[in-house]
Image: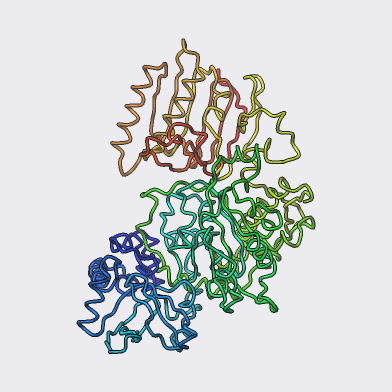
Amino acid sequence: MSNLDQKINQYFEGLVVRKDLVKEVKGNAIVPSYVLEYLLGQYCATNDEASIQTGIETVKEILRRHYVHRNEAGLVRSNIKEKGRYKIIDKISVTLNDKADVYEATFANLGIKKVLVDSSTVKAHPKLLVSGVWSIAEIEYDFVEDNKACPWLLSSLKPIQLSDFNFDNYLEARQQFTTDEWFDLLIQSIGFNPDFLSRRTKLTQLIRLIPFCERNYNLIELGPKGTGKSHIYSEFSPHGILISGGEVTVPKLFVNNATGKIGLVGYWDVVAFDEFAGKQKRVDKALVDIMKNYMANKSFSRGIETLGAESSLVFVGNTQHTVLYMLKHSDLFADLPQKFYDSAFLDRIHCYIPGWEMDIIRGEMFSSGYGFVVDYLAEILRFLRSYDYSDRYQKYFSLTSDISARDRDGIHKTFSGLMKLLFPSGEATLLEMEEILQFAIEGRKRVKDQLIRMDATYPNVQFAYLNESGNSQDVMTLEEQEYPQYYNKTIPTENLDSTITSPLDFNSHNNLTEQTIIIKENQKGITFDCLFGPYIQNVNQLTIIEPNLKNSHQIDNFIEFLETVIKFKLEEEEILIHLITTDDEFQVNTQYEALNHIAKSCSAVGIVLTWEVDPTKIQDDSCQIITTHGWQIILSQGLNLFQQHNKNNIFSFSNRLQQLRLCKACQITYKRKSVDH
């Protein structure tokens, strides 16, 4: 186990599970992850490998014996008849038969209906009345001559969720972890390997959890297919429900006026709409109108009375175009159905997650480390819904007066949610609060900026905050920084070149200037050609101090840098490159062999590459590129500028084109240096 995994097991003993076990036990059972983790939490919540393997076999046996597969329902019903009583795992829903004045249960996979349920069970578990609950149930079979009587009896029912927890113990254990460690624990709990996610991507993943811990939070995420937008809402918590965007009606979501039955928002903490995008989708305008009122006022009308609810609404959907295309031709809400493409509706959204920043999910991104049993975390988040941390930043910062009340509400809810997730005690440092405040502002700004593009009646807003010294700090979205020529509607796009501008704009070697540029995390459009090309053009000698040339992707980055050198050198000239690096203490022979192979290949393309290992010439993790015509380029991240991507996918263009890759946060400084003769 890693040091973090050992620490997790030490302070949350019995409440965590190894995340790769879910796949191992799931097999062909069509059952949510939280159901499996509930069982794993009973038998595998340990770090002892022998106990884990015994627990896995126990869980597999429980699923084999008690989980009801639809194609084996007849056999299970026969077992119940022959044994008289049998325990099963199934999704159970309950309806009221008002003619007989009884509650009747339906078992989704077992295929039986009209099973009598006593009122006390329904009162204890009201979600049985809405869409059903996964449960461990004990069924009896008692045949009687009366044809109208149901022979099936429900002896006991236990929803698959945690019975209790100690919040004070949770807070106490949280204090034992650094902020970075806690980030990684939460990411592992979701099921991802934190090593494959940048800090910004981790924050984005956590925003997906805010609806579970923040009441009446309205969230939207639009982006490419396959990025895991809906996973959390279908698999993560027994308190959330995922429905297809086209399947919802006013009675199902809010209230049925004919029967008085409350809809989904009255029973679930989170109602998520999958496949929400799609211009051709037919949408009931009455649904949109009642959703507007609910999202703004937390209430909805039922004929003569108004009812309130606490359910958060989440909208996830796929975009059909790139961000640049949407910004040039329309806006970032362009793929929504026409009835939802309504500024009054969209203005109720508290945060817009940029789904295009999330990488396509691939196997290596899943975690094999330890994380919370998701049901435990789900109960913690549900408990935190009663808290409000929205004002905690105000001892350090204040929002500028330009920000409206509705914008503030969105910012406050996102900030409060992230505080609950990362700092459940409500206390954080100035820098920690500033990081999540900036992220909260950006999420609401993305909504408002698109509304301004859609509707000219919306005034321009400067999204900024004031620090303790009274200095104003503007907040920009990442796409605003990447594509400034298209982002702001006031700029006439027809007069702009359609190409993506690089962060460096040089017309000739003589126009080079000293400067520092900041590359934001998850930024795209960056290439070695635009960063280095103008500064190394026609140079005859380079010195590169790069401390990190140890694993394969770092070696790949160095080779790609040499490709840039080849593009910008005179074909008829040779260039001398001297590399200074450090040993890979674990695979030094492999490292030396790779560098020798690179040097040999360079000789065929006009590069004389020499290298040495000398730690005394390396001060930190930054990379320095020094030219003989007087420039020094310093990269805070080294040449390891790009986040890890799927190199095994030969059909991925990000393997071939650097501008399509997500970047790490990096500062690059260009300084003039005296030339030695």
- Vertical position of residue 562 compared to residue 619: above or below: above
For the C terminus, the image quarter is top right
Q: Quadrant of residue 552?
A: top left
Q: Give the total number of marks visible in the rendering.
A: 0
State the image coordinates of residue 153 (x, y, percent, origin top left): 33, 85
The color scheme shown is: rainbow
- 176 and 142: which is toward the camera: 142
Q: Quadrant of residue 439?
A: bottom right
For the N terminus, the image quarter is bottom left
- Vertical position of residue 454 compared to residue 633: above or below: below
- Vertical position of residue 114 compared to residue 659: above or below: below
Q: Is 631 situated left or right of 81 in this image?
A: right
- 155 and 386: which is toward the camera: 155
Q: Is 491 situated left or right of 222 in this image?
A: right
State the image coordinates of residue 672 (x, y, percent, origin top left): 62, 27
State the image coordinates of residue 371 (x, y, percent, origin top left): 40, 64
State the image coordinates of residue 25 (x, y, percent, origin top left): 28, 64
Identify which residue is drawn at 51% across, 54% down.
Answer: 275
As drawn, which residue projects farthest toward the top? 572
Q: Is 521 situated left or right of 57 in this image?
A: right
- Vertical position of residue 386 compared to residue 531: above or below: below
